[in-house]
């Protein structure tokens, strides 16, 4: 009996003596997580960051660690498309750090092994609200930008199907509608992100804007974009031309094309826009949506298509819907079929610990109790390891 | 109804938090604020640390307390008091005072957004400051909140007393809870009334809290006005009879 007691006491002394009391009240499965966090807590505090800032070199060993992106690059690569809370965090910390997570690593592995002669593969990131789909998409975009791909990034599909103040009848096709404001804003951001390609790509067809203006075959794509930005009436048609030309020319092999759409379920849902006679407009009657649907079809090669589903901005979808079938509907699912679904889930214990460590390093968690084990357990409980919730909780602690 | 409880039970004098002052219920005197609980009900002990103390560390009285609680009737704990480590009674009280129409969700979200706004402003200042000034910048929104409200508390108050058909503002000492209440009330009224139309409450509140933390701003000025009035009416202090 005494030998048993001695072994027990020596085991107890191996752990931190202050936590002896807590052990007795904990359930066995959280014990493993607790020990994990203790072990990582006692080792040097470098686990939350990695010095590997090139997404191409991210491997499983970097999983859970944050890598920093230079702020100058953020302005060129992401003129739009970052979640607003992340932008606030970037401004507060004066740095942009993304966590390397499994879904992004999986996607990177697929992208590195793409065969550019086969049709473009569609990857769909799906998951619960706040799990990190948009930021995983941003990780992929950063990787592709570093590899010199042409990035076609639509920041939020839902913005194009709701709250449009000025809807014009399209000059190209009488049945469809133009959205000059949204199109011109998007063209401006597209120009910022892909400056160098605009002076290299030449269009292969003549397009006539109106009786006096036209753009000849062989002129630069930059001209089309300029025309769209300056003449807001033709912006939607300019977007259509850009999409058509890029799709045609990516197969030639001059550049690699990445089509990244956040909130792709907007393309096949319903809109809240109405005609003058108050009858609803279907998404395919909007020229932007019509052209984007053609882009997302896998009948071209020379790149990849990465899509994200989002319930947050969606229209007429229940709050709990997060699966592809629920959010895309029959029409959307059939249009996107076949695709590779990638689930983005909540943080596992290692990632959670890393996130808390990152906040502690930036002194973001100012509350005294947040540094203690009790505080961390409570944060885990309150947020359920959901990245979005954890960020909102830590904001006021 | 139970007979008035006599205070002969030992250990009542060192009851921990949440004790109501046990007023003797004499027949003929009706309570102004009364509860549905009869006098033998005891207040609940929310603190987790109290129950986690090992037996060896507890004093005689605490052991007696624990034994007593096993048999005594205990009131239900209010929904707002959690066993959370992040709970702060002053923040809860402030949130309740900000609440309108029972909309606690809105009041709490305003409070959390205010704390976040305070934190972000301080971080901005921190990053803009030189290394020598950085040590002086306080980034913890909770310390700023507590210090700001403490700075707003008046030392002496005024009470209208009727004498000879006229009401006179008589300077009077204030209890701790009255002072805390006045500070919070002034802060909330100031933010509600003097706010520009399109500015949201968290932004205005964070601005006022930061100014009060540095002993500037309209709430501090109101406190000083109160002190000046009290000083001016010093002669009327004799009208107070308590």
Image (cartoon, rainbow, N blue to C red):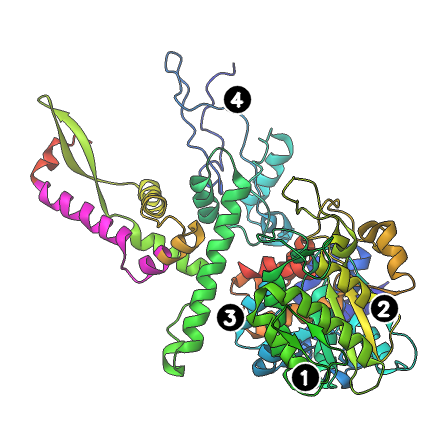
Give the distance between the C-alpha atoms of the residues marked 4 and 3, in whole angstroms.
50 Å
| Category of crowding for the residue at label 3, using alpha-carbon neighbours closer than 10 angstroms: few (below 14), some (14–19), many (at least 20) | many
Q: Do labels 3 and 1 share a chain?
A: yes
- For the question of whether residue A83 can be seen, the reply is no
Q: Sequence order check: which comes first, mark 3 or mark 1?
A: 3
Residue at the disc numbered 2: A122
The residue mark sitting in front, 2 or 1, is: 1
Residue at the disc numbered 3: A92
Residue at the disc numbered 1: A220
The residue mark sitting in front, 4 or 3, is: 3
Give the distance between the C-alpha atoms of the residues marked 1 and 4, in whole angstroms.
82 Å
Q: Nearer the viewer, residue B73 or A170?
A: A170
Residue B226, image x and y in percent?
Answer: 20, 45
Left or right position of A331 against B110: right
Name the chain letter of the residue that bears numbered label 3.
Answer: A
Q: Is A325 located above or below residue A260 in the figure? A: above
Q: Residue B57 carries which label?
A: none
Q: Sequence order check: which comes first, mark 2 or mark 3?
A: 3
Q: Which residue lies furthest to the top in this view?
A: B28
Q: Which mark is residue B36?
A: 4
Q: Nearer the viewer, residue A175 or B91?
A: A175
Give the distance between the C-alpha atoms of the residues marked 2 and 3, in whole angstroms.
35 Å
Q: Sequence order check: which comes first, mark 2 or mark 1?
A: 2
């Amino acid at each position: 009996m005494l030998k048993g007691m001695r072994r027990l006491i020596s085991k107890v002394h191996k752990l931190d003596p202050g936590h002896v009391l807590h052990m007795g009240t904990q359930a066995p499965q959280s014990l493993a997580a607790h020990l994990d966090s203790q072990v990582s807590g006692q080792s040097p505090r470098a686990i939350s960051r990695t010095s590997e800032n090139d997404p191409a070199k991210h491997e499983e060993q970097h999983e859970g660690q944050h890598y920093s992106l230079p702020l100058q690059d953020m302005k060129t690569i992401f003129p739009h498309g970052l979640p607003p809370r992340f932008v606030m965090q970037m401004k507060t910390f004066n740095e942009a750090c993304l966590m390397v997570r499994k879904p992004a690593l999986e996607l990177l592995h697929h992208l590195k092994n793409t065969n550019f002669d086969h049709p473009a593969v569609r990857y769909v990131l799906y998951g619960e609200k706040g799990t990190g789909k948009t930021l995983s998409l941003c990780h992929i975009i950063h990787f592709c930008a570093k590899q010199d791909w042409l990035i076609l990034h639509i920041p939020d599909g839902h913005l194009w199907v709701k709250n449009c103040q000025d809807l014009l009848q399209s000059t190209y096709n009488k049945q469809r509608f133009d959205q000059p404001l949204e199109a011109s804003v998007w063209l401006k951001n597209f120009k910022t992100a892909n400056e160098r390609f605009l002076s290299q790509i030449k269009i292969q067809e003549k397009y006539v804007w109106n009786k006096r203006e036209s753009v000849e075959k062989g002129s630069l794509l930059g001209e089309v974009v300029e025309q769209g930005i300056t003449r807001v009436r033709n912006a939607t048609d300019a977007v259509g031309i850009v999409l058509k030309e890029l799709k045609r020319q990516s197969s030639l092999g001059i550049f690699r094309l990445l089509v990244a759409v956040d909130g792709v379920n907007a393309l096949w849902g319903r809109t809240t826009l109405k005609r003058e006679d108050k009858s609803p407009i279907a998404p395919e009657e909007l020229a932007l949506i019509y052209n984007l649907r053609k882009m997302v079809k896998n009948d071209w090669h020379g790149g990849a298509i990465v899509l994200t589903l989002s319930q947050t901005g969606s229209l007429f979808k229940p709050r709990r819907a997060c699966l592809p079938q629920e959010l895309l509907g029959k029409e959307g699912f059939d249009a996107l079929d076949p695709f590779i679904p990638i689930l983005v889930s909540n943080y596992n214990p290692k990632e959670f610990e890393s996130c808390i460590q990152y906040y502690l390093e930036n002194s973001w968690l100012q509350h005294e109790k947040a540094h203690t084990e009790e505080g961390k357990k409570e944060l885990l409980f309150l947020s359920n390891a959901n990245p979005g919730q954890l960020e909102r909780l830590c904001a006021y602690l | 109804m139970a007979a008035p409880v006599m205070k002969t039970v030992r250990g009542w004098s060192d009851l921990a938090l949440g004790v109501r002052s046990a007023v003797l219920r004499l027949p003929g005197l009706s309570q102004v604020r009364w509860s549905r609980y009869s006098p033998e009900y005891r207040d609940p002990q929310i603190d987790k640390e109290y129950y986690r103390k090992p037996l060896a560390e507890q004093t005689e009285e605490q052991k007696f307390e624990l034994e007593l609680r096993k048999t005594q009737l205990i009131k239900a704990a209010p929904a707002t008091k959690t066993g959370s480590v992040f709970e702060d009674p002053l923040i809860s009280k402030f949130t309740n005072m900000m609440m309108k129409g029972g909309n606690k969700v809105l009041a709490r979200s305003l409070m959390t957004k205010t704390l976040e706004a305070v934190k972000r402003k301080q971080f901005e200042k921190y990053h803009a400051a030189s290394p020598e000034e950085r040590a002086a910048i306080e980034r913890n929104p909770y310390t700023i909140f507590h210090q700001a409200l403490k700075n707003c508390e008046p030392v002496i108050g005024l009470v209208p007393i009727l004498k000879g058909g006229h009401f006179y503002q008589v300077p009077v000492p204030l209890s701790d809870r009255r002072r805390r209440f006045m500070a919070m009330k002034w802060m909330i009224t100031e933010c509600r009334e003097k706010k520009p139309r399109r500015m949201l409450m968290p932004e205005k509140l964070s601005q006022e809290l930061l100014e009060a933390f540095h002993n500037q701003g309209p709430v501090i000025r109101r406190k000083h006005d109160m002190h000046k009035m009290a000083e001016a009416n010093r002669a009327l202090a004799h009208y107070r009879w308590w």
